[in-house]
Image (tube, helix red, strand yellow):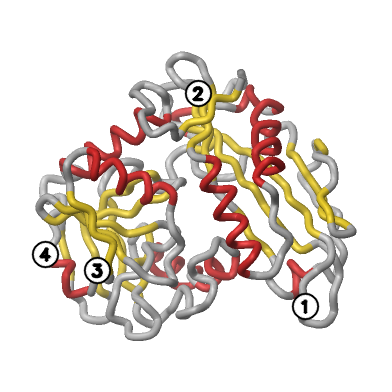
């Protein structure tokens, strides 16, 4: 195992030994290849560079207390990447190629998987790009599917400690009936200016509102938003929100723990009614929110008055982490163990 200070790892790129690649050419997918290069040799007219034919996934592999390596809900990531590919007219990666590629990337880089109990994980980044050249606005005829890995720490430096977020009304992340519900790079590029400004003003991320009416809660930057109100887990419903696999899992756990689950449009005015709020996603798992600042109105919504995450968020976080790391029963069959 590498001589790495696992507890101090940032959420950043860390060079590992190998990545895995597979090309779609002449109407079919080829063989899975291994590379030690961090670079891609790409045509200057590739559609990913000009017309945004690019999609990606974020996943984690965990080393359990029993030493086994677990991947969390890979099938959902494979399905989501297929939806993303369909949304911007790319060749869809078959589930079997997706699975073989992520497993191979993990096996080739096992020394970079953080030990159990260090608060870190091996992050997997499956990437699909249009590598074939086009000058006109049309889909490529060649695609590259690539998987690289990197050991990472928490997405937000606070880890599982409450963060402050800012509502952005003068920037939109995604348009109605646009690409907001699929995981493509353009959605993240659209949110960068708002995110940078929020960071500069002392906030961890941005809470976007819907771009049509500027009335309903959308996404919390790179994560889904959720709230606890009494005995209910509430999360926004919108065609411009990326369906988070973590959020999907938390909803299942909440129901299993006896909570009611509501997935519905949530107005910004409701923020004053919630007991707990948070952001959730693969990178952060759960980031409890202690304050939401509406930049335009100046209004603040405060939570976590004692400085700690709320009790329901804490229970959900601990239960999900225990399943991912193998210290609790995987009763839903979410983990795949890499042999």
Image coords of residue 203 (percent x, y): 33, 61
Q: Quadrant of residue 338?
A: top right
Q: Give the distance between the C-alpha atoms of the residues marked 2 and 3, in whole angstroms.
A: 37 Å
256 displayed left or right of 71: left
Q: Quadrant of the C terminus?
A: top right
Between circles 1 and 2, the one closer to the viewer is 1
Between circles 2 and 3, the one closer to the viewer is 2
For mark 2, give the secondary structure.
Answer: strand
Which sits earlier in the primary sequence, circle 2 or circle 3?
Answer: 2
Which sits earlier in the primary sequence, circle 1 or circle 3?
Answer: 1
* Residue shown at 54% from the left, 64% from the top: 182
Residue that label 1 marks: 138
Q: Give the distance between the C-alpha atoms of the residues marked 2 and 4, in whole angstroms.
A: 39 Å
Which residue reaches farthest bottom? Answer: 213
Residue that label 3 marks: 293
- In the image, residue 171 sits, relative to residue 317, either above or below, namely below
Label for residue 273? 4
- In the image, residue 173 sits, relative to residue 55, either above or below, namely below
Q: Quadrant of the N terminus?
A: top right
For mark 3, give the secondary structure.
Answer: strand
Residue that label 2 marks: 63
């Amino acid at each position: 195992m590498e001589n790495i200070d696992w507890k101090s790892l940032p959420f950043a790129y860390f060079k590992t030994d190998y990545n895995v690649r597979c090309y779609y050419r002449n109407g079919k997918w080829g063989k899975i290849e291994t590379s030690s290069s961090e670079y891609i040799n790409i045509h200057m007219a590739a559609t990913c560079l000009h017309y945004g034919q690019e999609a990606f996934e974020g996943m984690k592999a965990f080393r359990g207390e029993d030493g086994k390596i677990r991947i969390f809900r890979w099938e959902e990531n494979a399905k989501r990447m297929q939806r993303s590919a369909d949304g911007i007219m790319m060749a869809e990666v078959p589930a079997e190629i997706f699975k073989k590629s992520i497993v191979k990337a993990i096996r080739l880089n096992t020394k970079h998987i953080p030990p159990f109990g260090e608060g870190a994980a091996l992050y997997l980044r499956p990437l699909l790009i249009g590598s074939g050249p086009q000058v006109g606005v049309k889909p490529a005829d060649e695609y590259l599917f690539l998987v690289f890995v990197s050991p990472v720490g928490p997405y937000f430096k606070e880890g599982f400690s409450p963060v402050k977020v800012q509502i952005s009304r003068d920037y939109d992340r995604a348009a109605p009936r646009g690409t907001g519900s699929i995981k493509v790079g353009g959605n993240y590029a659209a949110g960068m200016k708002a995110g940078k400004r929020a960071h500069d003003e002392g906030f961890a991320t941005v809470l976007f509102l819907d771009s049509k009416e500027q009335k309903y809660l959308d996404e919390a930057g790179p994560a889904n938003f959720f709230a606890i109100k009494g005995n209910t887990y509430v999360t926004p419903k919108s065609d411009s929100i990326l369906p988070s696999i973590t959020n999907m899992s938390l909803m299942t756990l909440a129901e299993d723990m006896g909570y009611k689950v509501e997935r519905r449009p949530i107005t910004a005015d409701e923020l004053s009614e919630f007991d707990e709020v948070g952001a959730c996603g693969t990178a952060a798992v759960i980031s409890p929110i202690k304050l939401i600042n509406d930049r335009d109105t100046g209004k603040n919504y405060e939570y976590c008055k004692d400085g700690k995450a709320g009790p329901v968020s804490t229970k959900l976080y601990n239960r999900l982490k225990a399943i991912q790391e193998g210290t609790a029963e995987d009763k839903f069959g979410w983990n795949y163990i890499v042999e």
